Amino acid sequence: FESVGVRPMRLRRGNKLLVIIIASFTAAVLLVQISVIKHLSKEDSDSKTLNMPLTAAGQNSWAEEQRSKTMDKKCSAAVDKLVDCGINFLAIDFDQTMIDVHTGGRWQGTALELTEHMRPVFLHLVPEATNRNIRIAICTFSGQTKHIREVMEYVFPNIAELIVIRGNDKTWEYHGNGFKRGKQQHMASAAEELLAEQALGVTDVTKATTLLIDDDPKNIRMSLKDRTRAIWFNPKEPNELLDNILMLK
């Protein structure tokens, strides 16, 4: 009887121990499962967080690529029009025209910083025109021509040496008999250099083959008065330039 009575006691203790072991094991498994779930949730959250900006960046990149293709297409059409009109020389103002600020000839930053102000329309138009043997000159009242030259080298590394620069830096003089008001003497002097440098590939530049692009209405009026075609550049609507070129006669 005692042995029978003792065995149940031992069995109950064994059961309790077994229950404790099973409970401990179950708790351990549960903790592992919770830990795994938390880890996977964190990975999923991190993945979503990472993918969100990448998706946005991808969309922005696609939109930018589409804008660039559209700009290339419009610039190509504009250059076709220039060629049809017999234009082989573009004289482009710098402040508030090629760039979106007016330095007043007193830019305090670096040339690299100034490149950030280049207007996209000219980043497309200048190379396209150059590829069609239309030569470019920067005609400006600014005396910071060294800065401007550096900007050209940064943004147009393959064609910068073909771009003539005329500014109020006292490094050149125009001795011709042409009109000297506005940007006329700047353009005339630049044309002389283009004709003198055979490597630039220009054999004939005249008023009839020249187009001035400038944001200053006074310079536009002076150019037209001197029988040189000119387009007023609207700083608030820079891409209108291409539409205006297409309307040239």
Image (cartoon, grey):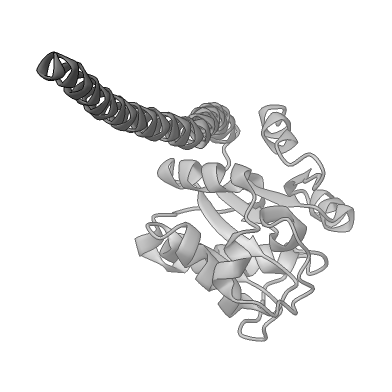
**Residue 107 x %, y %:** 71, 76
Direction front: furthest residue: 1
**Residue 173 x %, y %:** 65, 81
For residue 99, above or below residue 51: below
- 57 vs 1, nearest the viewer: 1
18 horizontally vs 111: left or right? left
**Residue 176 x %, y %:** 67, 73
195 horizontally vs 114: left or right? left
- 193 vs 140, nearest the viewer: 140
187 horizontally vs 1: left or right? right
Does residue 74 appear anywhere in the picture? yes
- 97 vs 54, nearest the viewer: 54
- Image quarter (top left, top right, bottom left or bottom right) of the N terminus: top left
Residue at 80 percent across and 48 percent down: it is 235
To which quarter of the image does residue 197 belong?
A: bottom left
Direction left: furthest residue: 3
Residue at 78 percent across and 69 percent down: it is 180
Residue at 60 percent across and 33 percent down: it is 85
**Residue 65 x %, y %:** 49, 31
- Image quarter (top left, top right, bottom left or bottom right) of the C terminus: top right
To which quarter of the image does residue 125 belong?
A: top right
Does residue 192 appear anywhere in the picture? no
Image label count: 0
For residue 198, above or below residue 3: below
For residue 53, above or below residue 106: above
Residue at 47 percent across and 64 percent down: it is 154
